[in-house]
Amino acid sequence: MTQSATREFVFVKTFARIRAIMNGLGQIGYHLAVLLLSASIALSLPAIAHTFLTYWARVENDKTSLLILEAIVASLLIIFANALRLAFGDRALAKMAVDAGLVSYYPSHAPRARKTIQQLKQRQGAGRTVMAIGSSGYGTLTDQVGDLASVLERCTGAKILLVNPYSPAARARISAIADPDYTVELFQQEVRQSIELLKRLRAIGKSVRLKFYSDPPLVKLVILGDYLWLQHYHPDLNIRTMPEYVLKHNSNDHGLYTFYYHYFVQRWGSHEIPEYDLDTDELVYRGLQGKEKRRVPFGPEEETDQVGVPSPSLQPITLGRGLSVHSQPTGKNAECATDERAKWHL
């Protein structure tokens, strides 16, 4: 075990011990508060009874006061009955949420919500392997206020899936957002910054792996131990405007945590998604048995699709003297190309 890994292990153990002590102190404080409240109510009962009897002796023969008192009591009973009905409904919803593994929901990324999310990720990410699916990774990995910016410094490793910035999916995503200040070039620059961060993490001894997928992003997914953070990539909206859900692993096999965890495992294990070589800046394609099949440079010069077959819409036609143009496909190839273009807009 290296010296940095030893320090990391000691930090994780110390942090866990401090958190256990704080939880114990919180439970003790809660029980003391309940005990003091019960004692206060018991000691004040005689005074409350005397006050009530005095008030009742004054209003028992006053019809107006009795009517007002009856109206107040009836209103309180109605409010109590409605609150009880809502409580039972909320209890049923809470049970469904617990069974599904949903523990938190943040409707927007307000400053307080962002701080709460980041604190929870820091607690769960220390000494663990980070597993994430994202778009460019900039807002999650490299941004100083990103959700995982500080977590990656204390994790033991990372498995990251990002969108290939030179794929049609990236261009379709940027076009759908319709932000004039957010261009494909900026998206590619953000991906490059994420790559540089992962290279630095690997240089200090962390186990880091990166893969690029070439289909439109569906979810932003972060897995840290028994907790999972989930956001949906809306076709037309920025991810920062979307709500974030926190799922927790439980003993129920039907929980949503298990579903999305298997989703990540399937995506990560897909042989159609190449792995990025952090040493050579190449995309490595592997077969079903995990053996390396081929490598292609990572960059705009790559004009092949995800499985390495040239796009039918870019078939060259030689005109002579070394001149060529890219023709549009005809016949059956035209139908395939149309289906392929339509797929990126679904």
Image (cartoon, grey):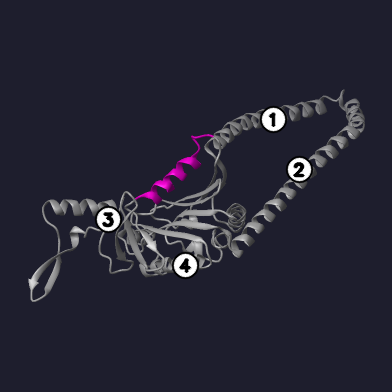
Q: Is residue 112 magenta?
A: no
Q: CA distance from mark 3 to mark 2?
A: 56 Å
Q: CA distance from mark 2 to mark 1?
A: 30 Å
Residue where numbered disc 3 is placed: 307
Question: Which type of secondary structure does the marked residue at label 1 adopt?
Answer: helix
Residue where numbered disc 2 is placed: 27
Q: Position of residue 201 (x, y in %)?
A: 51, 65
> What residue do we see at 36% from left, 63% from top?
165
For the N terminus, the quadrant is bottom right
Q: Position of residue 44 (x, y in %)?
A: 90, 34
Q: Which residues are magenta?
A: 252-270
- Kindly tell me whether residue 178 is visible in this rendering: no
Labelled disc at residue 186: none
> What residue do we see at 8% from left, 76% from top?
321
**145 or 242: nearer the viewer:** 145
Q: Position of residue 127 (x, y in %)?
A: 59, 55
Q: CA distance from mark 2 to mark 4?
A: 43 Å
Characterize the local packing of mark 1: few (<14), some (14-19) or many (20 or more) Cα atoms within 10 angstroms: few
Question: Which type of secondary structure does the marked residue at label 3 adopt?
Answer: loop
Q: Earlier in the sequence, mark 3 or mark 2?
A: 2
Q: CA distance from mark 1 to mark 3?
A: 63 Å
Labelled disc at residue 80: 1
Q: Amino acid at mark 1?
A: Phe
Q: Position of residue 263 (x, y in %)?
A: 42, 45
Q: Earlier in the sequence, mark 2 or mark 4?
A: 2
Q: CA distance from mark 3 to mark 4?
A: 26 Å
- Tell which tag, 2 or 4, sits nearer the viewer: 4
Q: Earlier in the sequence, mark 3 or mark 4?
A: 4
- Tell which tag, 3 or 2, sits nearer the viewer: 3
Labelled disc at residue 199: 4
Splitting the image into 4 quarters, where does residue 324 fall? bottom left
| In the image, residue 223 above or below residue 210 | above
